[in-house]
C-alpha cells in the first residue's frame, strides 16, 4: 500500500505519506480507512506528503474527484495541506482536483510544493513546529 500514516496525538497532527504507484482502488481504500480511524477527532491538522508518488497512470482525475466528493467525510475544524513535488505537474493537478472537491468536508485545504511552508501553515507556533519536525525526522 502506498499510504502510510503517523499520528502525533499530543499535537493533533497527522502525517500521511504517499509513495510509489497509486491507483483509484488504493485511494478509495485509504480514504475509507482514514474516515474510520479519525472520525471522532475534531480540529485535526493533516499533512499529506505526495512528493514520493512515482506513477499515476492507473488513476484518473474523475476517480480522484469521486473519492474527494463522495468518500470523504466531514472533519469539523480540520485543515489539510497537500504537498506535491515542484516538478510533478500531473500529481499537482490531481491534488488540486482533490482539494477542490474535498474542501466541503474540512475547514480549509491548501496545496503546497514546500514542506516547511506547508508545516508553517498547519502549525503556527514555532516551538511546536520544531518539535514536530524532530518527531517526523525520526525513523
Image (tube, helix red, strand yellow):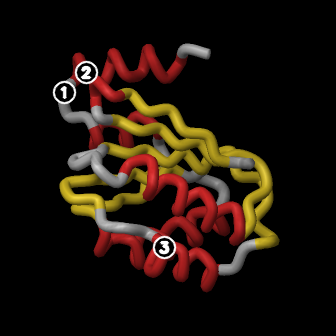
In the picture provided, is 130 more to the left or to the right than 5?
Answer: left
Asked if the residue under mark 1 is in contact with the one under mark 3, i.e. CB atoms within 8 Å, the reply is no
Cα distance between the residues tagged 1 and 2: 5 Å
Q: Return the x and y of residue 39 as percentages of the image width and height.
A: 35, 54
From the viewer's perspective, is residue 38 above or below residue 91? Answer: above
Q: Residue at x 43, y 69 (%)?
A: 72
Q: Residue at x 40, y 76 (%)?
A: 100
Q: Kindly identify which residue carries mark 2.
A: 128
Q: Residue furthest bottom?
A: 62
Q: Kindly identify which residue carries mark 3.
A: 71
Q: Kindly identify which residue carries mark 1.
A: 125
Cα distance between the residues tagged 3 and 1: 32 Å
Q: Residue 55 versus residue 113: which sits nearer the camera?
A: 55
Q: Quadrant of residue 35?
A: bottom left
Q: Quadrant of residue 17?
A: top right
Q: Which mark is residue 79?
A: none
Amino acid at each position: 500500500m502506498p499510504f502510510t500514516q503517523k499520528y502525533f496525538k499530543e499535537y493533533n497532527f497527522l502525517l500521511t505519506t504517499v509513495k510509489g504507484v497509486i491507483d483509484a482502488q488504493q485511494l478509495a481504500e485509504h480514504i475509507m480507512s482514514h474516515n474510520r480511524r479519525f472520525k471522532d477527532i475534531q480540529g485535526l491538522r493533516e499533512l499529506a506528503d505526495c512528493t514520493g508518488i512515482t506513477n499515476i497512470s492507473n488513476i484518473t482525475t474523475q476517480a480522484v474527484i469521486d473519492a474527494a466528493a463522495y468518500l470523504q467525510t466531514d472533519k469539523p475544524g480540520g485543515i489539510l495541506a497537500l504537498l506535491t513535488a515542484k516538478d510533478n505537474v500531473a500529481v499537482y493537478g490531481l491534488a488540486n482536483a482533490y482539494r477542490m472537491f474535498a474542501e466541503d468536508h474540512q475547514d480549509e485545504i491548501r496545496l503546497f510544493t514546500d514542506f516547511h511552508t506547508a508545516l508553517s501553515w498547519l502549525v503556527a507556533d514555532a516551538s511546536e513546529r520544531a518539535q514536530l519536525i524532530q518527531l517526523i525526522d525520526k525513523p
